[in-house]
Amino acid sequence: MLEEKLNIHFKILKLKNWDEVIEKTKIRDTDMWGAATPTPQRLEYMLFTQPFIELPAVIIVRNKTQATLSLKELKGLKIAVISGYGIHDYLSLNHPEIKLDVVSDISTGLKKVSFGMVDAMIANIALATHYIEKDGISNLRVAGKSGYIYKWGLASRNDWPELNKILQKGVDLIDEREKNEIYRKWVGLKIASSLTFKDFVLPVLSLLSLFAVIAIIISNRVLKKQVKKRTRDLQMILNSVGEGIFGLDLKGQTTFSNPAAQKMLGYSLEEMSGQNQHSLIHHTKSNGEPYPNQECPIYLALRDGKTHHVAEEIFWRKDGTSFPVEYVSTPIIEDKLPVGAVVTFRDISKRKNDEILLKQYSNSLERSNRELSSFASITSHDLKTPIRKIANFCVYIDDGESRLSDQAKKYLSKIDLAATHAADLVDGILSYSQLGEDTAPYKKIDLNKTILKVKEYLEVEIREVKGKIEFNNLPSIFGNELQIEQLFENLISNSLKYKKEGVAPIIKITHSEKSEGNLQLFVKDNGIGFKNIYAEKIFDPFQRLDGDISKIGSGLGLSICKKIMLAHEGDLTADGEIGQGAEFTLTFKKMIENE
């Protein structure tokens, strides 16, 4: 209408609520309002034209509130108002005795009244009429007038007074017929059947009342069916769950219990109803001491309104026996205050028994491991003594001056080699059995320093075969330093041992980081390799794929490497090809410091 009268095009902005309208207007993202009432707060940043329509702000309540109300009767009640609306500003300044529940929009406020979350709402009659019908709300009525009149005019930013003058000119051009048309558009076309107005003619009021009665009857019948269905559904849930559930009032007396609770406690619903639940099932602690009410977490939920979870206590059955439980006490809140509690619990007897058995198995396993470790140490000492004697006697017999035949010397050399292998085997068994007993805390390990240290350990072996170890800029990891050193020492020794005849061994150590954050290290050599069908078998204890006893070792080196990687929550795999060397992949799944 104004666009036609002023020959001006207005760009309409659709915002989610009035608070956003005010916020954007204050920062000048919007320039004017299409309909608003002047208030002291708004006059700080807006200019207003003369009003083109006046609408009363009415008090809207639920149908069951029969009294006629004014602002005087609203003292101490919770009243919904729309944030930033004229009635909000008016009540904040002039009626501090009224408790305001500020909502973002009228639809929210009307629903709060309908559901009993607030006592009433004050809003202009036009918006109330429109949204009651739009949202299908059928249990509201007008209980009186607030005395506040919405005088809607056009509002524009106060730093553009010329715009206000232009808008005022447009308002002045609106005649009475057009004003009446505006009023009918806002109020006259759609009146919610649940509202009653003093100004309506009696026949219309009677007809609307009849519709309201019919709607209430139908609504009540539908509601009863819904309540009956939901009650049945809830009862089925309570009856089917395996956890025990019971309810308490503020006095701690039982209000309901499900079949699972009755079965576990040995009480029927009739025996528990109205009884002090703490005195019935929670009166004594597991050590035999009395359990005072004031210390009970279940009752604490009734006092502080918070949910309390208890991992382990005991409940007492009707027959005087007890059983361990885990339970949650959840308060029932109404008007921000606890009015009762619901307790869910479960019998954890099986879990407790399993924990005891697990502890027994753990202790037994630990004792067995200690005995095996001790046995391995003693056996190692006892076996190495005669082995050393055999090796020494070989030296004594073949002292360089003996008259032994070449054949005898050959056999004597084999005896010495076998004795050396037996000593290595004993040492390997001892190392393998004791792996994992080192309880040193994990630390950050620079792998570059680790490889350099291993090179020093194996200096003689590397020099003898003219070997090379290539690596550069390896990352750091967290782990057991001694075990990581042993890991790389075994891998490098293995590559040196299984080199090609007449070819200097080259061992390359590289790394990569996988997308999920894991680290992979690769130890690759140019040795004799192996058939890939044995890629898993080579990690088994005492495995020698070549069967050559002349290669000194226990056959446990790679088994120890595998065990070290598993202890670090990682993995070790191998890949090989005859004549093309072998590659070992070490995957560390955790690259963060051990907590």
Image: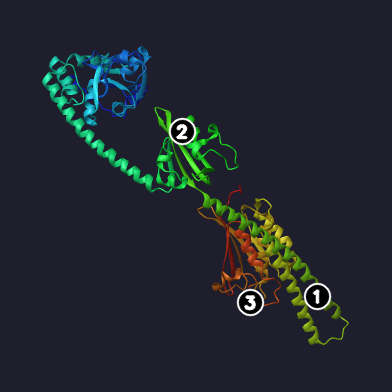
Is 295 rendered above or below residue 513? above
> Which one is closest to the eye, mark 3 or mark 2?
2
Query: What numbered label is drawn on residue 546?
Result: 3
Mark 1: few, some, or many residues within 10 Å (few <14, many ≥20)? some
Q: Which residue position is annotated with label 2?
A: 252
Q: Secondary structure at mark 1?
A: helix
> Which residue shows up at 23% across the image and 31% down it?
136
Return the mark for residue 22: none
Position of 89 with respect to 548 (left or right) is left
Q: Amino acid at mark 3?
A: Asp
Picture coordinates of residue 286 (x, y %)? Answer: 58, 43
Query: What amino acid type is highlighted by mark number 2?
Result: Gly
Q: Residue 54 versus residue 271: which sits nearer the camera?
A: 271
The vertical placement of 343 against 335, above or below, is: below
The mark nearer the N terminus, 2 or 1, is 2
Label 3: few (<14), some (14–19) or many (≥20) C-alpha neighbours in 10 Å: few
Q: Position of residue 6 (x, y in %)?
A: 19, 19
Left or right: residue 230 compared with residue 5: right
Badge 1 is on which residue? 391
How many other residues sit within 10 Å of disc 2, few (<14), some (14-19) or many (≥20)?
Answer: many
Disc 3 to disc 2, how far (Cα)? 78 Å
> Is there CB contact under 8 Å for labels 3 and 1?
no
Q: CA distance from mark 3 to mark 1?
A: 25 Å
